[in-house]
């Protein structure tokens, strides 16, 4: 009797059409000239914008651009994304790696600074480039492991039972495709002592379509407790699409927190901070941290001095219930946690 071996039919995987958010990610504005023209800005801003762009490129999604006021160079959202000539100035104390993270990377793409939790750089890119970003000079090319290279990080996690929480960071972790994230999370779930998955992301804010069925599918399905720390600095960033995205995340069992950076010319007014806390809570997000600026080179013009920061927060406390108060903190290299101011 002849046993016929079934002929395996290998079909090429159907190329999947990019999701709406991926198309928006591909189409972000990457040219300071286009940014200035689209917003009707004074052409005199362009030389400074181009010089800053050479240091840290412009990236602005259309969904974010739509929330920026036309022809207003002081718009608080514009100030977060438009390079200025001031970025070229060397200012004492402002350095490329203010948090000395490169000394805390025991495996490529894994940062272990604090007890009980580690941070995985799940994506080297962001949807938006924030001019004040403390990782604007981070050598992502050296810390963007492939799925196979995650093995070393997963072994590290498996061997340290004190680690309860994995933080997906970046770049922006949600800039990665869902298939890749779902596979990573499925592998994390096999480590018994891991309890929580935290995601630090700005994508649901800058491209709210990122919170689609594919994301909610793997996120809602994991056994790990889910915390998402959004990054919103101004109430004007919270439009109805962002509120809807937050509601979808909450319905999937995600605890939503927000961290902001205190930025001169963006949110360094008590009214602005109070409105931000109110709008966050209305969207189901709890204010968590208000960070003072990390002293990264190119961002000194955003700095708010400590006395002004404390005075602002004291005034805010007069206005808001305690649960709407973010904690004013600074991250110091070598410290075991964030340092309250
Ligand atoms: S890591 Fe966060 S703060 Fe930095 S550029 Fe990306 S989205 Fe902005």
Image (spheres, rainbow, N blue to C red):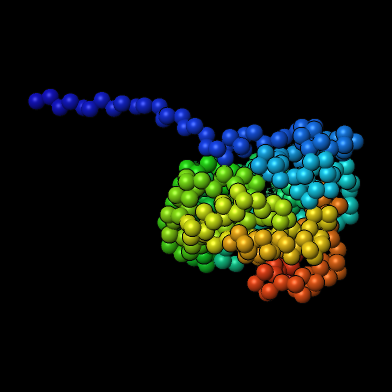
Left or right, 80 with reference to 210 = right
Q: Quadrant of the N terminus?
A: top left
Q: Residue at x 82, y 50 (%)?
A: 299
Q: Position of residue 79 (x, y in %)?
A: 80, 47
* Image-quadrant location for residue 57: top right
Which image quadrant for residue 4? top left
Q: Which of 239/153 is in front? A: 239
x then y, percent, for residue 231 = 67, 55
Quadrant assignment for the C terminus: bottom right
| 254 left or right of 127 in image | left
In this rendering, is residue 36 above or below 187?
above
Residue 101 visible? The answer is: no
Where residue 107 appears, as percent x and y from the top left, is 59, 51
Query: Looking at the image, can residue 267 be seen?
Result: yes
- Which residue is rendered at x = 58% and y = 62% of the image? 284
On screen, 102 above or below 48? below
Which residue is rendered at x = 40% and y = 27% of the image? 12
Q: Residue at x 89, y 52 (%)?
A: 91
């Amino acid at each position: 009797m002849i046993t016929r071996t079934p002929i395996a039919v290998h079909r090429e995987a159907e190329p999947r059409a990019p999701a709406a958010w991926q198309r928006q990610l591909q189409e972000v504005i990457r040219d300071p000239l286009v940014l200035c023209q689209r917003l009707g800005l004074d052409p005199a801003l362009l030389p400074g914008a181009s010089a800053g762009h050479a240091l840290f490129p412009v990236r602005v999604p259309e969904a974010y651009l739509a929330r920026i006021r036309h022809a207003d160079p002081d718009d608080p959202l514009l100030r977060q994304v438009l390079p200025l000539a001031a970025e070229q100035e060397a200012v004492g104390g402002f350095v490329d790696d203010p948090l000395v993270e490169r000394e805390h990377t025991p495996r490529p793409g894994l940062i272990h600074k604090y007890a009980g939790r580690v941070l995985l750089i799940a994506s080297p890119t962001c949807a938006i480039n924030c001019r004040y970003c403390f990782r604007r000079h981070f050598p992502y090319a050296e810390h963007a492991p492939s799925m196979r290279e995650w093995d070393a990080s997963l072994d590290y996690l498996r061997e340290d039972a004190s680690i309860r929480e994995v933080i997906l960071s970046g770049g922006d972790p949600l800039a990665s495709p869902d298939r890749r994230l779902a596979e990573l999370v499925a592998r994390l779930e096999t480590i018994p002592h891991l309890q929580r998955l935290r995601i630090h992301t700005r994508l649901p804010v800058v491209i709210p379509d990122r919170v689609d069925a594919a994301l909610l599918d793997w996120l809602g399905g994991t056994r790990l407790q889910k915390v998402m720390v959004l990054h919103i600095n101004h109430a004007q960033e919270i439009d109805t699409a962002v509120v809807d995205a937050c509601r979808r995340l909450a319905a999937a069992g995600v605890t939503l927190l927000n961290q902001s950076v205190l930025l001169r010319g963006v949110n360094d007014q008590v009214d602005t901070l109070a409105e931000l806390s109110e709008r966050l809570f209305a969207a189901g997000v709890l204010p968590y941290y208000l960070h003072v600026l990390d002293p990264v080179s190119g961002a000194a013009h955003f700095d708010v001095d400590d006395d002004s920061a404390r005075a602002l927060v004291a005034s805010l406390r007069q206005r808001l219930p305690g649960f709407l108060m973010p904690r004013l903190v600074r991250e110091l290299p070598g410290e075991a946690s964030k340092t309250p101011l």
